[in-house]
């Protein structure tokens, strides 16, 4: 109960080529020798950060989600990352495409988080519908807040809401964050860890995408004091780390800053 092991996969992606990406990622996951419990893939791991959902989107019954189910079951892991998903259940809008993070359990059950903050600078808001609910998953007594890329710039969406106990222990961002803004990526990951007294994990891609935008990776694990436990620049990498809840509890006990936080609640009416 006091520890949880994560594997970060920082990789280049084949532009809009789902079969190639799933094959490549399956090889990387199958190469894992050490025990792990949660494997984290980048944002839009099957396609790259594409604004072509009309030709690339799948349903929750589609082959990429089925691939996640098969890998999670076969490796006995939790597998997470985001995909381009078409979901027709939202009757309020004609745009039914989502940048959807999927939290796939080894038993085939899953949780979903639809990216709240769409990157309008690249036109994401014109192609994808925003989510309106956070997803905080539970694993072995840990609570994990799952978010996507551009969400990192909006601290209120990640902020521990006031109460007797912190809402979550780990904050995860999956991303296609470009190298030209890597300073913001690295700085904000540390800031989110410090202000929320939690571990933060950011998993980014590397290499050029189909728009010739370069990604330097800089995937990172940060402890609740803001100390960087791992980071990797430019190169593909697979890194496994075990996080200690005893350390997290000790920081929160010794420095009970969250108790002094502003009292607020995020409700659907605020979105």
Image: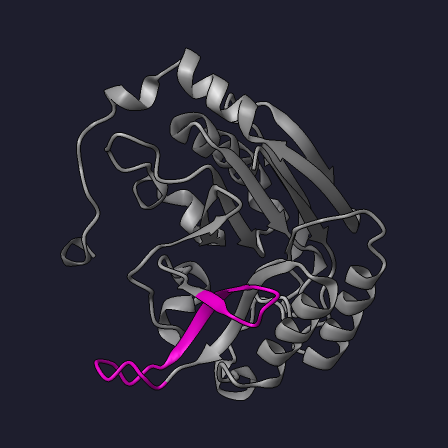
Residue 110: say if magenta: yes
Q: Quadrant of the N terminus?
A: top right
In the image, farthest residue toward the front:
1
In the image, farthest residue toward the top:
254
Name the residue at 74% across, 60% down. 12
| Residue 17 appearing in the image | no
Q: Quadrant of the C terminus?
A: bottom left
Q: Quadrant of residue 255?
A: top left
Q: Position of residue 26 (x, y in %)?
A: 77, 68
The stretch of residues the image draws in magenta is: 88-111
Marks counted in the figure total 0
Name the residue at 14% across, 57% down. 269
Q: Position of residue 136 (x, y in %)?
A: 40, 51
Is 114 situated above or below 17?
Answer: above
Name the residue at 85% across, 58% down. 31
Q: Position of residue 170 (x, y in %)?
A: 49, 40
Looking at the picture, tell me which residue is in the foreground, 88 or 17. 88
Is 77 situated above or below 241?
Answer: below
């Amino acid at each position: 109960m006091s520890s949880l092991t994560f594997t970060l996969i920082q990789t280049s992606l084949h532009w809009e080529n789902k079969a190639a990406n799933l094959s490549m990622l399956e090889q990387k996951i199958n190469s894992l020798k050490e025990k792990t419990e949660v494997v984290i893939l980048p944002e839009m791991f099957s396609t790259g950060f594409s604004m072509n959902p009309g030709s690339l989107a799948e349903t929750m019954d589609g082959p990429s989600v089925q691939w996640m189910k098969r890998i999670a079951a076969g490796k006995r892991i939790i597998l997470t990352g985001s995909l381009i998903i078409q979901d027709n259940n939202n009757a309020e809008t004609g745009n039914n495409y989502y940048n959807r993070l999927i939290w796939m359990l080894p038993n085939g059950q899953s949780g979903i988080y639809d990216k709240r903050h769409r990157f309008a600078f690249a036109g994401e808001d014109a192609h994808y519908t925003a989510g309106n609910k956070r997803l905080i998953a539970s694993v072995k007594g840990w609570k994990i807040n799952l978010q996507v890329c551009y969400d990192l710039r909006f601290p209120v969406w990640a902020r521990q809401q006031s109460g007797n106990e912190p809402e979550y222990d780990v904050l995860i961002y999956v991303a296609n964050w470009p190298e030209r803004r890597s300073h913001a990526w690295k700085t904000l990951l540390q800031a989110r860890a410090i202000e929320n007294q939690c571990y933060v994990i950011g998993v980014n891609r590397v290499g050029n995408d189909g728009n010739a935008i370069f990604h330097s990776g800089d995937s990172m694990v940060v402890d609740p004091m803001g100390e960087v436990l791992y980071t990797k620049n430019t190169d593909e990498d697979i890194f496994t780390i075990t996080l200690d809840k005893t350390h997290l509890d000790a920081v929160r006990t010794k420095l009970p800053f969250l108790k002094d936080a502003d009292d607020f609640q995020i409700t659907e009416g605020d979105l």
